[in-house]
């Protein structure tokens, strides 16, 4: 089908490139001691990019059965479009990393997750424990008149959600990890203790505090703000970093790197969705934003080469420091440790960098966790936050494919509370 | 997808010893026209076609598979892998699928293919030019026109066979402006569950006048004050407070597991007497309307909270069995790759009779939240958050300076009781809601309300 579409396009003097995705996912969800859902997905889809005259047009489809109709649609779009940026297609052969699809041992996973229900014997407040395992396998291929590229990627992710109850008051905590050898019982215990602490939470007075954000929270913020580094957004003047390239606006310790070839638990990407080779790059270094992330279109606009970021970022991380999280907490003396942020899709703004997020964590007194905090709001700005770094911990962690981070200690950050 | 073919696939399912089996077939074409940098910058078209097969066994465990390989060979293999633990050849007879209630083409609709692409582009260009003419020195104008056509067929082992056709159309305009080192952003969204007659309802001049004021106010906005305070929430999208505070907690997906703060509270007073919440999937041409839900059941008007008393939940087929309650036509999914579950359609707060002027005058120190953004909720704890995109401080009963965007957070149990005043300016707005079964279009609506106390996430304490 792919060859037929390329041949048909070439016959009409249309240069065409097809990116094919072949996904297979298995998800197992367990509640307490019982399997709740077993979900499998097998799906192929295609992104077709065509150069017609001076126009570049795109179409995403799940089937190539009617190539004539696809070409007709692309031609109609080209006729209508004003944008005349002509982007290059993949030319360079890239050696694939071939990985066989691993099979999921369903029975073993169900047993591992349901056996966590035993923890109810030790914690009478434990109302429910829900576990999830997802295995993702993906084959990506890129075809045009010059090259055929192929890559595979797979990973497994565990998710755990615990709910505790004391009289009518419920609290719940959730976490996810990509380490398939993770000690699930230990992970569940951490969440249970956190949820139990939350049953007796306090708020605090609106003020500025010294704050530590956990590695999960920093990674969540970096994931949410990752598009601000993309040239597409900057060129359209819709990123808070528009006009700020090479300005020294961040703390020295904010050393941000993107490395799609780094083995961070979610596999590697050797080329992006346009077939551009990926590589390690420093995005923020020596206090400045030094490298925009380019896909082919934005690179053409700036007359540079693509940085292999047509999918955004993959494996972006903040370089870890040398101290442990415990040392950061001891060093904080009095302040706030935040280990959960909620509502990132609504409480962040890429245009002005503002952050206003529901937060949970602990009040730190004399370098130790004193009591649980809830009903507080982290009220800051991306540039302000990362220009107030005191120290970066050594606990780099990736919770998802895009971004990872260690815990970070910040000075003088506004937190809103009930008082 | 023919009925014969579905019947054949259903036969393969029905032979097994299962409690419930379902096939959901979907075709969808969506196109987004993006106007930016004073030109038609991009056209993104997506075409999907696939099936979701759901098996529920006698322990009410759900086995779900989605695929877009529609060969008989693959479908048979998929059904076999989902039912490998079930006894074979239980039913020798074929399943008899009922006749579908025919699709009734709505009147007065401009279907997506009835409007020429060049006219869609013309609309975008005119809107862009008008924005740039009315508001000086904009750094960017972005206008998106989205159209989506979906055809579904659903059949199940209870004999249900139903088809449906759905259309959604929306326009989003966003403006960026920079001045004196400040960056302002303002966005407005209009949508319907119908066609391009939508464009005639958008009063461009009125919309742009309002956006002009909002963007100028943002450029001089000060830090928002933080802490608990009374808040007036504007009409329309302001209803995100109810969507998050109680809408999700009334979905059977969390209630059946008893992991909702509203589980077990039917017929109890959970909100102020001013609160009556309705979810109605039948409102003509509304953004969240469908004729049938994704299990083939006709949508309906559901009164969820009446005068503060919890009257019903939003219930899908399987959670209905678990809860021993009747489904409410509320089963939805983003597409065939998701198993369906109970979701909201068009949810709104019934109008009251309080006056907005009285609300403002009653507040010595508080916030006027004029335009809201999105939010989220933990249904077990009832903790929820939502963002305010355009806001003003209220001091001594008067609306004062504009303040920067902020999040508002609260807890279901507390906030529903805190709804102190409800006006009569009910408006509906369209949004996209993400949950267990993916992203679906939902309408939310409310008149202006006053909440006596809610935590505002500002950066300063100036009381």
Image (cartoon, rainbow, N blue to C red):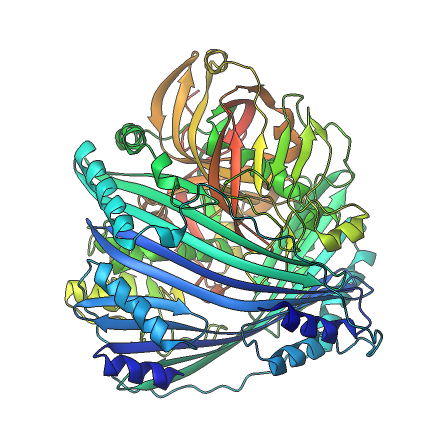
Q: Is residue A326 visible?
A: yes
* Residue B100: quarter of image: bottom right
Q: Is residue B267 left or right of residue A321?
A: right
The percent position of residue A122, horizontal first and vertical second, equals 80, 57
Q: Is residue B359 above or below residue A96?
A: above
Q: Is residue B437 left or right of residue B297?
A: left
The percent position of residue B313, horizontal first and vertical second, equals 71, 41
The percent position of residue B261, horizontal first and vertical second, equals 70, 40
Q: Is residue B323 left or right of residue B117?
A: right
- Quarter of the figure with the N terminus of chain B: bottom right
> Which residue is located at x 61 percent, y 29 percent?
B415
The percent position of residue B269, horizontal first and vertical second, equals 74, 27
> Which residue is located at x 47 percent, y 36 percent?
B429
- Quarter of the figure with the C terminus of chain B: top left
* Residue B3: quarter of image: bottom right
Q: Is residue A46 left or right of residue A39?
A: left
Closer to us: B68 or B277? B68
> Which residue is located at x 80 percent, y 68 percent?
B18
Closer to us: A317 or A300? A300
Q: Is residue B181 visible?
A: no
Closer to us: B373 or B442? B442
Task: Report the label total.
Answer: 0
* Residue B163: quarter of image: bottom right
> Which residue is located at x 20 percent, y 72 percent?
A305
């Amino acid at each position: 089908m792919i060859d037929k579409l390329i041949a048909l396009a070439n016959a009409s003097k249309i240069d065409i490139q097809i990116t094919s995705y072949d996904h297979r996912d298995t998800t197992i969800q367990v509640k307490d001691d019982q399997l709740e859902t077993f979900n499998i997905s097998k799906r192929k889809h295609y992104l077709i990019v065509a150069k017609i005259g001076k126009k570049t047009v795109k179409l995403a489809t799940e089937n190539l059965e009617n190539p004539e109709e696809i070409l007709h649609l692309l031609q109609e779009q080209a006729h209508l479009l004003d944008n005349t940026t002509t982007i290059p297609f993949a030319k360079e052969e890239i050696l694939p990393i071939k990985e066989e699809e691993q099979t999921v041992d369903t029975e073993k996973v169900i047993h591992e997750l349901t056996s966590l229900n035993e923890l109810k014997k030790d914690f009478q407040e434990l109302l429910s424990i829900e576990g999830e395992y997802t295995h993702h396998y993906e084959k990506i291929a890129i075809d045009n008149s010059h090259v055929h590229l192929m890559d595979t990627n797979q990973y497994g992710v565990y998710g755990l959600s615990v709910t505790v109850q004391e009289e009518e008051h419920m609290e719940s905590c959730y976490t996810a990890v990509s380490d398939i050898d993770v000690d699930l019982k230990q992970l569940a215990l951490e969440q249970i203790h956190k949820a139990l602490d939350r049953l007796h939470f306090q708020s605090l007075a609106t003020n500025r505090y010294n704050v530590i954000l956990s590695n999960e929270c920093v990674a969540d913020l970096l994931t949410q703000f990752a598009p601000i580094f993309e040239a597409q957004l900057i060129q359209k003047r819709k990123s808070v970093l528009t006009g700020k390239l090479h300005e020294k606006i961040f703390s020295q310790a904010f050393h941000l790197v993107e490395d799609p070839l780094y083995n961070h638990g979610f596999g590697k990407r050797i080329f992006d969705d346009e077939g551009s080779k990926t590589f390690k790059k420093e995005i923020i270094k020596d206090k400045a934003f030094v490298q925009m992330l380019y896909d082919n279109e934005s690179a053409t606009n700036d007359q540079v080469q693509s940085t292999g970021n047509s999918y955004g970022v993959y494996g972006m991380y903040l370089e870890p420091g040398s101290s442990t999280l415990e040392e950061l907490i001891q060093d904080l003396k009095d302040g706030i440790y935040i280990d959960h942020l909620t509502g990132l899709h609504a409480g962040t703004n890429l245009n002005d960098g503002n952050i206003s997020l529901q937060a949970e964590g602990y009040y730190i007194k004399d370098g130790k966790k004193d009591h649980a905090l809830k009903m507080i709001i982290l009220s800051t700005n991306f540039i302000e936050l990362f220009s107030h770094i005191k120290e970066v911990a050594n606990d780099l962690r990736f919770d998802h494919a895009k971004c990872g981070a260690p815990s970070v200690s910040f000075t003088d950050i506004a937190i809103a509370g009930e008082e | 997808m023919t009925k014969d073919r579905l019947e054949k696939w259903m036969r393969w399912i029905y032979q097994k010893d299962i409690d419930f089996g379902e096939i959901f077939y979907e075709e969808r074409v969506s196109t987004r026209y993006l106007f930016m940098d004073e030109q038609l910058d991009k056209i993104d078209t997506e075409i999907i076609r696939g099936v979701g097969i759901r098996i529920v066994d006698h322990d009410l465990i759900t086995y779900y598979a989605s695929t877009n390989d529609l060969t008989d060979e693959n479908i048979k293999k998929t059904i076999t892998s989902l039912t490998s633990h079930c006894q074979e050849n239980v039913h020798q007879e074929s399943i008899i699928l009922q006749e579908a209630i025919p699709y009734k083409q709505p009147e007065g609709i401009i279907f997506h293919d009835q409007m020429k692409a060049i006219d869609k582009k013309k609309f975008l260009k005119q809107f862009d030019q008008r924005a740039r003419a009315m508001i000086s020195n904009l750094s960017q104008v972005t206008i998106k026109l989205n159209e989506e056509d979906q055809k579904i067929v659903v059949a199940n082992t209870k004999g249900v066979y139903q088809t449906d056709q759905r259309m959604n159309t929306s326009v989003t305009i966003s403006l960026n402006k920079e001045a004196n080192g400040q960056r302002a952003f303002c966005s407005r969204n209009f949508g319907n569950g119908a066609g391009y007659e939508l464009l005639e309802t958008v009063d461009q001049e009125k919309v742009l006048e309002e956006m002009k004021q909002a963007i100028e106010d943002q450029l001089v906005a000060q830090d928002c004050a933080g802490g608990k305070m009374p808040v007036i929430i504007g009409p329309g999208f302001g209803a995100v407070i109810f969507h998050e505070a109680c809408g999700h907690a009334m979905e059977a997906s969390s209630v059946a597991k008893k992991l909702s703060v509203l589980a077990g509270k039917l017929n109890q007073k959970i909100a102020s007497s001013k609160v009556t919440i309705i979810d109605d999937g039948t409102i003509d041409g509304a953004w969240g309307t469908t004729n049938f839900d994704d299990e083939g059941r006709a949508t309906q008007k559901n009164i969820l909270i009446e005068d503060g008393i919890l009257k019903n939940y939003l219930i899908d087929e399987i959670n209905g069995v678990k809860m021993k309650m009747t489904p409410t036509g509320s089963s939805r999914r983003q597409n065939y790759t998701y198993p369906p579950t109970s979701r909201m359609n068009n949810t709104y707060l019934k109008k009251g009779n309080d006056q907005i002027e009285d609300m403002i005058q009653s507040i010595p120190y508080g916030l006027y939240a004029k335009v809201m953004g999105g939010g989220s909720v933990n249904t077990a704890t009832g903790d929820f958050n939502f963002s305010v995109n355009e806001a003003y401080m209220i001091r001594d009963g008067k609306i004062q300076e504009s303040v920067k965007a902020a999040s508002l957070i609260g807890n279901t149990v507390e906030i529903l009781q805190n709804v102190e005043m409800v006006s009569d300016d009910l408006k509906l707005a369209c949004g996209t809601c993400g949950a267990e079964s993916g992203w679906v279009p939902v309408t939310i609506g409310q008149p202006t309300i006053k909440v006596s106390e809610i935590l505002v996430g500002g950066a300063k304490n100036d009381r």
